[in-house]
Image (spheres, rainbow, N blue to C red):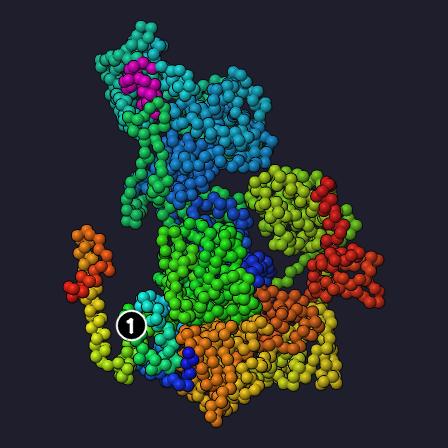
Amino acid sequence: MTVTLSELDTRFKYDVANEPGGENIKLCFACGLCTASCPVADIDQKFNPRRIIRMVLLGMRKEVLSSDTIWFCIQCYNCQGHCPQNVDFADIMKALRSMAVREGYVAPSFVEKIKEIDVFCQKLRHEMVSAIVDSRSRGVEVEPSGLAKEALQRL
Amino acid sequence: MEKQSGNGKIGAVLVVGGGVGGIQAALDLAESGYYVYLVEKSPSIGGVMAQLDKTFPTNDCSMCILSPKLVEVASHQNVSLRTYTEIESINGEAGNFNVKLRKKATYVDWEKCTGCGVCSEWCPVVMKSEFNMGLGPRRAIYTPFPQAVPKKFVIDKEEERLCHAACRDACPLHMNVPGYIKLIAEGQNEEAYKLISATNPLPAICGRICYAPCQEACNRGQLDEPLAIRDLKRFATDDFDIEKLEVPAVEPSGKKVAIVGAGPAGLVAAHDLALKGHKAVIFEALPKPGGMLQVGIPEYRLPKELVRKEIEYITKLGVEIKTGVEIGKHISLGELRGEFNAIFIGIGAHQGMELRVPGEDLPGVVQGVEFLRNVNLGKRVRVGRKVAVIGGGNTALDCARTAKRLGAEEVAILYRRTRAEMPASVEEIDAAEAEGIKIEFLVAPSRFIGNKRLSKVELIRMKLGAPDASGRPRPVPVEGSEFQLSINTVIAALGQAAKTDFVKELGISLSKRGIIEVDPGTGATNIEGVFAGGDAVTGPAFVVDAMAAGRRAARSIDAFLSGMPLPAEEKSEPQKLTSEEIQRLKNRFGESSQHKMAEVPVEQREGFGEVTLGYSKQEACKEAERCLAGQVTGCIQCLECVDRCEAKAIDHSMKDTFEEVKVGAVVFAGGYECYNPSELYELGYGRLPNVVTSIEFERILSASGPFQGVLQRLSDGVPPQKIAFIQCVGSRDAKHNRPYCSSVCCTYAIKEAMIAKEHSTVPLDVTIFFMDLRTYGKDFDRYYERAKEESGIQFVRSKVYSVEAVDSTGDLVVKFTTEDGAIKNEKFSMVVLSVGFQSSPELVKLAKEVGIQLNPYGFCQTKPFSPVETSKPGIFVCGAFSAPKDIPETVMQASGAAGEISAFLASARKTLTKERVYPPEKDVAGEEPRIGVFICHCGINIGGYVNVPDATEFARTLPNVAYAERNLFTCSQDTQERIKKVIEEYKLNRVVVASCTPRTHEPLFRETIRKAGLNPYLFEMANIRDQCSWVHMREPDKATEKAKDLIKMAVAKARLIEPLKPLSLPVNRAALVIGGGVAGMTGALTLAEQGFEVHLIEKSNVLGGIARRIHYSLDGEDVQQFLGKLIKKVQEHPKIRVYTDTWIVDVRGYVGNFTTEIMRYRGRVIEKIDHGVAIIATGAEEYKPDEYLYGRDPRVLTQLELEEEIVKKNPDIVNCDNLVMIQCVGCRNDERPYCSRVCCNEAIKNALKLKEMKPDMNIYVLYRDIRTYGFYEEYYEEARRKGIIFLHYDLEDKPKVRQERKGSQLLLRVQVKDKVLGDEIAIDADIIALSVAMASSPDVRELAMLYKVPVNEDGFFLEAHVKLRPVDFATDGVFVCGLAHAPKSLEESIAQAKAAASRATTILVKDAIIGEGIVAFVDEALCSGCGVCEVLCPYGAIAVNRDKGVSAVNEALCKGCGTCCAACPSGAVQQRGFTRKQISVMLDAALTGV
């Protein structure tokens, strides 16, 4: 596939840079530390922070804001803690998400659902950790993956 | 120092920092007529370069190329080396500064220190070597590395010792207790043993049975419990077998000493005398040697095997022991006196004291000493069921415990006083009681009862009365308290006496008690040459006292034998801690108790097996760590060094000293520090042992490093099979406040990777993880390609996220992502972090105090057009302190700073420098050779292996040798004086030194003999160190033979050597500068400002060169304004003559005397210019590309063309929407495999300028590696911040540019693959700017031929040495600078031009140039004029004279390399100083004999 830059919105990077948290996006020198440090990328290599930044810099506004991937970030800030250029990718994700909502790529209800998922995940995690802690005090070995069903029922 | 000055300026310069930059600046300045103070904070000059293993891109050994520079600067008469010195303050102003220096206390008098290293060898304090980055040890007294300059030692002392080392004073042998305890605490057990045995020849014995007065005095005992010093000593002897102890070679004195008695006194005396070279013969009455050690002390306390081994070692020293010979019976003392030069009597006290009690003669009553003697000699000894031992000393206890072991059922000790008065040691008493022996106090025998055999003893009770002569209460019998006890055996152990009747023969005086009377300080009896000591003198005492008596006597005998007065012993009283000291130490260390040795449990004690079990290593360490002396950091002041230093150079009372000097200018050459990556947790440094920094890796690779160059990882010493290098650690990292690029890491990583692969004993894979590979220097890209193609090193474009331990094997997992976004976890056995540069905090502090402006990262701020000036006039900078940079650039800047200063201080030149003055040279022509041979011990370096006295004797036998002597250090200052004196005294006309290598030392000795009035070439050297003692350490005899052969060869040659007269060439003080660009003009001005006449040649009709096309610099300076001023200055300077439209036609001559023929005005005028030096600054050109539609589409420009259009504000360009820059056009390819260095910066400069004019312009930079090295990285950051887009491409996948018709428009379409996106990108460009190669100037080759200088494959001039002589050529007097040398920035060209001028100045200031004496000469009768020599000579120094048809040597050009001599088919060419005859006599000497 050829990406023709004249068809893209080269202002996009400036817009992102004007969003709170997006200020440093242009400093990226593509070292890839964000991707290497990302726990989500560990699970799904389609999630590639460096590639998202590159898309923004090239002006791929529609492609980025309509992309699923900007919602995959779990906001752990690991990338941000390591970026040698202070690009603050986790904050950029927040900026992109709010732009996506504002520009109508996703409905506000979509964001609500994702918020719900986050809360649900936190609860699920809490339940599963509690179960493992309990099992430890009972002296039994429990496989974490086996607990998912149980935890889901309890929720 | 201040004698006179010019215009108020002072002709001296302070150079701060003794790294390669400081050294170069110092040398250039000193050679240019200025006095230099070279100040370095560490003990040696050399800087980081000394630590490097190899240098890129030639892989030369770093130390090998640096070492001669170190020697050169240190021996320069106009450089004052101030190492271990810090700068307190710099005040004043340009031309006149006051500098306050603080010389740190070295505790070693450098005037006396010969650098022999014996102190360090014996120093017990092991510390981490800074030089080896803490990976290897050094001692508290040390010199940083073997080739350190000056080779002087310093003591690393942080605080005064915490205790008084009372142990040492209390010990009769004054053993270095704190020293060996420290070594045990550090686990250096073998060394501990050696230190112990240095003062105590019977260590295993003393480690068991010494009464340990040291322990009694131990200051720790005042805090809690004393150290178990004796047990620690025993531990050291348990851990090391004396049979492995080396036997030193000693020169025999020819004197003989008889020793009577092989007890501890006699043995120590014999040992000490043997070490002094005297022949000691011991006469022992008993069948076995050892005295009381052998026959007095029971096996369970002192295994006899140990006694045997320790005595055996003494005999290995050459001591002879004759047993079974009783003096006075078998031989008389008088006979001994006749046969020997001296006598020592140490017969001990082996006679038991009688009880003087009725019935004493009854069988069953035995003498203790006799009883023990019989048992110890293995005689069958029986005891009864019930045994009583009379006495309270250790002998009594030995008897009792021995009796028990012989089967007695009941053993009692009967003592007439109480426990408190018992002379026996508490441990012995406790042990005896534990073994079931009863002790009856206040009781004494009054009668032994029995019929033929003892059956009962009558005892009487005692009470304590008034004190007697010994100070103890006298036991007084209690009237009527007699009682009887049935008993089978009584052992009387009351005391011993000596049997001294035999000494009366010589009239030796005895006391009333029959003991020998001696002078207590010297051990001398009243008869000359007869000495005595031990129990025979003192009455029964302790082993160590007897040993000390033996030592005292040996010292006296040695003095007596050499006719010296007898030395009196110095008394040293053990000092106690004061109560305040005790309190302070308690607060600091708390309290701890002694760790006890394990013992065999009482119930398991059988026979005569040893009772105590010794310490384990851990126990010993723990106990040793309690020593207060060892608690300080660094030197523990054990004073071993004081004892060891032959030169008496150690002075522990030294203090820091201050000094003020006046200088006219200052150079900051303080270098850099390596970044410590501990804060980068994920990378594992400090957390994982197999993660090391690049500088640590240099030391690991270095043959002089901690592992002798054997590549290994730190966790297990195993050679790694796979190494990862991680780049940009502490560089290009804004998060950690290091946004700048450290410039050198990419290339050094490649170097380390290549060397590692070469060194590795196993197949080794190396991967380098990088972001942009910055091999921008001259020939660095070729190096990079070689690394990929030839060495198979992998390069991965990725910043590594983490390094983690994979398991317990020490292997590591490196996590990173590839360009396409794949996350990889790859296993490595070792990781090297390529750490960046930072400036040292001390330097920053000093710079701030002085008022020099620094950048935010602590580097010195400079300006592009004045790259070596600081913000403060008169203060200059060079090297990594101004920005991270490599060695050649540092050297260039150093010379550049020197050039600038040389111009600034020109009025004060030669006001403070000294000239060497020599006496007139003696004419030795026609004299019979009188050769002096000086043979060096080099401390133990040679003397430890080669028998130097023997070799010296041998040298004396060689024909024509008028004199031979040996020296501890032939190179020391005092020996130089001595050599001069000897030359005078013995009328020597040739000198041979047999020592180390001529490479480092020949100039010194030549200088010495020149000072004695001899021609310096009347000198010859034999290398008996590097080529003999060092390589034949294990074969001392053969090494001695080889040394003799080497000396014989040198002497043979010396007979034939002749004085040589090097040419003295006058110097024409004019310079020719070729090239009127910025480099040429800067060089010309730097010289002209010093008053030298300069001819500036420019082939075009204007000055300015390529800079005419550069309008602004990255930091916004106006280049044209600068250039205009520079041209004006040059044109108006009275000393500069500018020749435009001028070409060089011909060049003749040599350094100091060139004649260059020039053609002006297109051949209409030919002129000749005489000059002493030439600087080539012919610049370079912009490559004209034929790719990317250049020349076919007007919208495609080069960067220089773009810049011109920007300046013109061409609306088509400054108002365009989309601009694409393509980097590396025409370079880094097969045709031009080099990086043009400036293009990344130029592209960013123009892109930023355009952004300034039109902020929303889309600018795309397509690059292979962005190479914004050093602080240029800030502009790369700035460019991204402004929205300029950087897209990476590979050489294999270059961008494509084509014209595409779209309606009425002809689009200029650039297509490039974006690896991050994974897609092709198409950009419709309005303008394309090509960053094209910098190509060499076309007239390079012709000029190179004319000046006989080389050119590299890329058409750039090749300097004399890529690291250390970056502006010189091998041809003297010709220099290079600017783009003619290699692509570089304007700033770098300016620095290099000043450097070339500085190097040229060192020649122009000379009145004459002394050529080389060792040059080729031609025997015209043999020469056939074939011209082979002419073709091969690398210096153009030999040529066939067409008229005569024979070759002739131009001595001014000849370097004495010998190529022509080797090549000449008829043997017509020979070399002075190495003639065929001279070499063949050496061969004869080696092969046949004299």
Q: Which residue is at a point 42% across and 57% down the rendered structure image?
A: B828
Task: Name which residue type carries label 1.
Answer: Phe
User: Is residue B1112 visible to us here?
Assistant: no
Tell me: B578 left or right of B642: left
Question: Hey, which quadrant is residue B1435 in on the image?
Answer: bottom right
Q: Which residue is at a point 42% across and 78% down the rendered structure image?
A: A1
Above or below — where is B269 with respect to B1243? above
Whether the magenta-drawn stretch holds residue A110 is answered as no
Q: Which residue is at a point 54% across and 26% down the rendered structure image?
A: B320
Above or below — where is B1092 with respect to B997? below
Q: Which residue is mark 1?
A: A72
Q: Using the image as rendered, state which of residue B891 and residue B1340 is in the foreground.
A: B1340
Q: Position of residue B780 (x, y in %)?
A: 54, 68
Q: Which residue is at a point 40% across and 40% down the rendered structure image?
A: B177
Q: How would you rate the neighbour count of disc 1 (Cα within 10 Å): few for under 14, some for 14-19, many for 20 or more?
A: some
Tag 1, which secondary structure?
A: loop
Chain designation of label 1: A
Above or below — where is B1373 with respect to B267? below
Question: Hey, which quadrant is residue B846 in on the image?
Answer: bottom left
Q: Magenta region: which residues?
A: B383-412
Q: Using the image as rendered, state which of residue B81 and residue B1115 is in the foreground.
A: B1115
